[in-house]
Amino acid sequence: MPITVVRSLEKELILKTKDFLLTMQEFFIFSMRAFFTLPKIKRYWRDFLDQATICGTDSIPIVLVSAISIGSLLAIEVGNLLEEFGAKTMLGRSTSISVIRELGPLLMGLMLSARFGSRNGAELGAMKISEQIDALRAFGTDPVAKLVMPRLAAALIMFIPLTALSDFAGLQSAALLAEHYHRLDPGIFWNSVYPRLAPKDFVVGFLKAPVFAIIITLVSSYNGFIAKGGTAGVGRATIKGIVVSSGLVLIANFYVSKIVLENM
Amino acid sequence: MIELRNITLKYGEREILKNVSLTIKDNTIKAILGPSGVGKSTILKLMLGLIKPNGGQVFVDGTDITNMKETELYPIRRKMGMVFQGNALFDSMSISQNLGFFLRENLQLPEAEVQERVAEQIKFSGLEGYEDQLPENLSGGMRKRVAIGRALIFKPHMILFDEPTAGLDPVSSKRILNLISELQQSSNLGAVIVTHIIDDVFSIADHAAVLYKGEIIFDDETEKLHKSEHPFIRSILSDKILEL
């Protein structure tokens, strides 16, 4: 009996590994196709503009809310800590590094994973279930070029200004809190920010934007493309897209910081 | 002409199609009959190269498309029109946008010609006055006619119908079948109709193939179905609709 159980577990493990490797292979091919169709952007410029509005302009409120929230919280908590050491004048420096390098882009990535990623997963999943993606293929249109490439191009372009906006809003809210909560002169706050920010701080932050754009768009779109099992399947695909892309955003956030900071 | 040669197809461990061979000649209507879930729609997807078989070959006008790349398949697919079971209309587009979509997308025709062809299909499908409506605002029969119009707008050689009358009321079903018949006579089109409704087969198909447990158990002129001694065919002839 135990031998039978071990064998069935072994068989299951082999099947799951095989499935995982096949999925990875499919995802890689899907991603390559999305990149290789980028030169067709001129043909799909209307789709690109639609997606740029969705992931760019329409995402501004959620990016602002998350940036203001994280900037304010950092100013309060870090300010309290620095006050204990009599180093409150360093608040601008510590807040700006956290916002520009790490928390600004990370929170923006997670918010966009939830907002833009869920939209991609649900929309493309519904199109897959209702055979609209098969219809595109059946009539000779490349669904990756038509549906995924404009999303990828839009995210690659729009995530950069969103990061800048997120950094700006985060720092402004931190400066406001520093002035009104910690009674720190704005001049002292900004004086500890500007002269000390190095190019690598911006490189780390802004490099994360295209990396997150690629992860969020491709993972969520791929999950939409392979959705099956009716409306419940669309739900599963959407959730999987958000969970996987959020996890990958967190991992990528760590490695981008590590690689850039170690090499600059 | 479309030809399937010794096709086998598996989904995981389950064998859907076992050594299936079929030929669909131009200018004829062939029905593929069988119970739900037996793999009839899969045959249409194989003909379009939307899925690859595990074994066997698919030929379209003499060209082996079995292992063609996706991009190589696009011009082949444009020779055929497909009417999906759920219509697969683009739900965010109006009827006229749905009809003209692939002309603009794939052929890049001048806008005047696109408009002309769209108007032609609107008239043929009896959808005048509904040009600007979204698919969700139309009845099932009307949506089916839009899907047929979209498949015809390319002027294909062959048109593939996946359960064209499923879920329609008797009047709409009759209208769709008449439309297909009229189409075949006026445009000399070939057609493949996948269905589980035997009356539809006798109404319009010249030839019929019966798919049962992954195998073709009958492939001949429709009228010869009556002479078949196969127990499954005898049972469907008496039951008329397959709900297995």
Image (spheres, coloured by chain):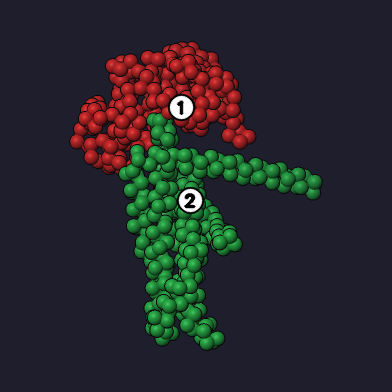
Chain colours: A green, B red
Estimate the x, y position of residue B65 in percent, counting from the top left.
50, 23
Q: Determine whether, in the image, residue B34 is placed left or right of residue B205.
A: right
Q: Which mark is residue B47?
A: none
Q: Residue at x 34, y 34 (%)?
A: B105
- Asked which secondary structure carries label 2, the reply is helix
Along the viewing direction, whichever of A239 and A162 lies nearer the viewer = A162
Q: Is residue B16 visible?
A: yes
Q: What kind of residue is marked 1?
A: Leu
Q: What kind of residue is marked 2?
A: Ile
- The residue that label 1 is drawn on is B73
- Mark 2 surroundings: few (<14), some (14-19) or many (≥20) residues within 10 A: many
**Label 2 – label 1 distance at C-alpha:** 28 Å
Estimate the x, y position of residue A52 in percent, counting from the top left.
36, 51
- Asked which secondary structure carries label 1, the reply is helix
Question: Is A33 rendered above or below residue A211?
Answer: above
Q: Is residue B238 visible?
A: no
Estimate the x, y position of residue A256 in percent, counting from the top left.
55, 59
Q: Chain of mark 2?
A: A
